[in-house]
Amino acid sequence: MYEKPGVPPTFIHRRSADGRGRWTRRLLVAVMAIAVAAGLCSAAFALSARWTDPVASGWWGTTGHTVGVGDGVVPDGGRLSPRDTGLPAIANLDPKLLRAVRKAADDASRDGIGIYLTSGWRSKAYQQRLLDEAIVKYGSEREARRYVDTPERSHHVTGQAVDIGPTDADDWLARHGTAYGLCQTYANEMWHFELTITPGGTCPTPLTDATDG
Ligand SMILES: [Zn+2]
């Protein structure tokens, strides 16, 4: 006999059942903890991927500084809403410029046009990186400077310039931008706008390119 003398069989049975229940509960808690941890890990991974990808990873400036979202790199296909202030490319823009772009975007959307930023504020390191890339692409600094300004001169670095897309948004802003004070600055960059005039004024003739003026 396995029953202890003096202990009713039903009591032993109940204790044993309670023991199993406790272990089942412990197992459930452990499984749930693992599931929560896995969920947190995947969320953290997704978040870190968003903040380092796609252009950011492996982008090294001449100073050896890795260029990422914190430098104004625009992730995920290069389209930002002017209301996406969670990203430094937007958050570090001149507030007056950002207000003008938002107002224009609201009005453009009534015409069925979506205005997005493909670039906004950039750190000096990011601007230098873009210039380095352009020098490789165009073969000389002189030619590269027609498309990408130096960190010292670029109005993206001071938060006073935005690049707008897609093309129909550039067309819309070229036609209606003066109402918001927004002008196309360079003839060879139809996407580059700055808050150049008081709303309702007339935009000056665009410079030929970034080396002009
Ligand atoms: Zn630009």
Image: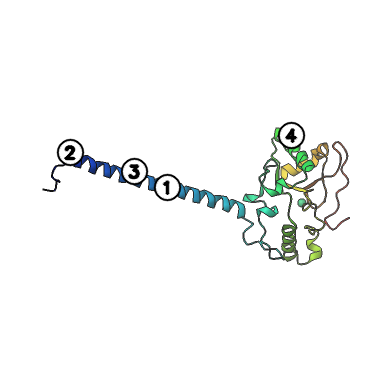
Is tag 3's residue or tag 4's residue first in the polypeptide sequence? Answer: 3
The residue at which mark 2 appears reads as 10
The residue at which mark 4 appears reads as 107
Residue sticking out furthest to the front: 6
> Is label 3 or label 4 in front?
3
Is tag 4's residue or tag 2's residue first in the polypeptide sequence? Answer: 2
Q: Disc 3 to disc 4, how far (Cα)? A: 58 Å
Q: Disc 1 to disc 4, how far (Cα)? A: 49 Å
> Is label 4 or label 2 in front?
2
Q: Disc 1 to disc 3, how far (Cα)? A: 12 Å
Is tag 2's residue or tag 1's residue first in the polypeptide sequence? Answer: 2
Count neighbours of disc 3 (C-alpha within 10 A) and say few if under 14, some if 14 to 19, many if 20 or more.
few
The residue at which mark 3 appears reads as 25
In this image, 133 relative to 195: left or right? left
Q: Position of residue 144 (x, y in %)?
A: 78, 62
Image quadrant assignment for residue 13? top left
Q: Position of residue 192 (x, y in %)?
A: 78, 49
Image quadrant assignment for residue 141? bottom right
Is tag 1's residue or tag 4's residue first in the polypeptide sequence? Answer: 1
Q: Give me the disc on residue 33.
A: 1
Residue contact at pointers 1 and 3, CB within 8 angstroms? no
Is tag 2's residue or tag 3's residue first in the polypeptide sequence? Answer: 2
Count neighbours of disc 4 (C-alpha within 10 A) and say few if under 14, some if 14 to 19, many if 20 or more.
some
Along the line of sight, the residue nearer the viewer: 75 or 123: 123
Residue type indicated by callout 2: Thr
Q: Secondary structure at mark 2?
A: helix
